[in-house]
Image (tube, rainbow, N blue to C red):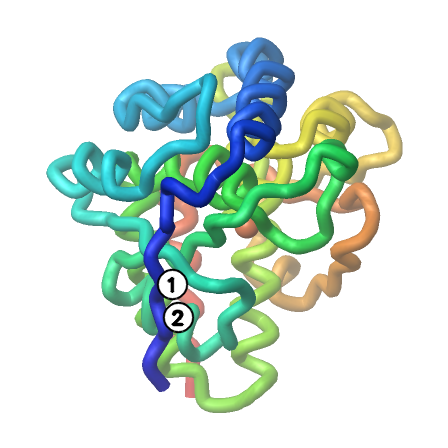
Amino acid sequence: MQTQFIDQDYASYSPENHSVWEELYGRRIGELKRQASSTYLSGLDALEIYADRIPSLEDINHRLGPITGWNSRAVPGYIPADEFFACLAERVFPTTTTIRPKEKLEYLPEPDIFHDVFGHIPMHADPVFGDFLQHFGRTGLEAKNEQQVTELQRLFWFTVEFGLIREGDELKLYGSGLISSPGEGEHSLVSNKVDRREFKLAEIIAQDFDIDVYQPILFIIENYQQLFDAVDEYHGGMS
Ligand SMILES: [Fe+2]
């Protein structure tokens, strides 16, 4: 079990690829100033992620490394759960480097660099979130059976991918799937079709999900330490 990393091959991006990034970034950033967790916005600033062209992972790592020790490494696509856990345990985030075609700006079922870099990586500049993610990876490596892998995937889904946080008296986005989606970001905050629940580990690990729809159930945390503590609790209960 060894993840095959690749080079980002920055020179291979076409002008159209860069313009897709610029358009997605431009569409999302204004709304995110209002919708996103302050932790996400601070990370985006600290990492100086470009607005007008696809970022270079090397540049991002150069800035992120001294902050939390996380780094982003290019992979060719989907990697199996055990490899994914192993990467996170080493503070490595496997990152897709291709970008969606212009014709599919709105929605792509599989991750691309906009989802992975714009959606995920700014959160890795937060020390508490970064520790949680590593703890999650280490815990995943200790999974004893498929059931535990599934439970951890649910925890990841309802937090890292689709999490909401309460900041003051407002709900904000921190999940990458919500951050990187123009339609679902707003929907998750205001729609009366979404059941927004308080974060409960037992409930989350029992909650199935469908990746192809706007999520009808979301979970709200109060702070990022809650995520670390949830992994710790899960880890303590593994047998
Ligand atoms: Fe993701």
Q: Is mark 1 within 8 Å of ligand 1?
A: no
Above or below: residue 156 compared with residue 169: below
What residue is drawn where x is 53% and y is 28%? 15
Q: How many marks?
A: 2
The x and y percentages for residue 51 are 45, 18
As drawn, the label of residue 119 is none
Q: Nearer the viewer, residue 213 or 52?
A: 52
The residue shown at (54%, 16%) is: 29
**Residue 235 visible in rendering:** no
Which percent across, then down, holds residue 114? 54, 37
Quadrant in which the N terminus is drawn? bottom left
Mark pair 2, 1: CA separation: 7 Å
Q: Earlier in the sequence, mark 2 or mark 1?
A: 2
Kind of residue indicated by mark 1: Phe
Image quarter where the C terminus lies is bottom left
Q: Secondary structure at mark 1?
A: helix
- Determine crowd level at label 2: few under 14, some 14-19, many 20+ residues with C-alpha closer than 10 A: many
Q: Is residue 68 left or right of residue 9?
A: left
How many C-alpha atoms fall within 10 Å of the one at disc 1: few (<14), some, or many (≥20)? many
Residue 85 disc label: 2
Horizontal arrangement in the rendering, residue 215 relative to residue 80 (left or right): right
Mark 2 C-beta to ligand 1 under 8 Å: no
Query: Under tag 2, what secondary structure?
Result: helix
Q: Quadrant of residue 220?
A: top right
Dots 2 and 1: beta carbons under 8 Å? Answer: yes
Residue at which label 1 appears: 136
Left or right of 138 in this view: 209: right
Q: Residue at x 24, y 42 (%)?
A: 58
Q: Tell me which amino acid carries mark 2.
A: Phe
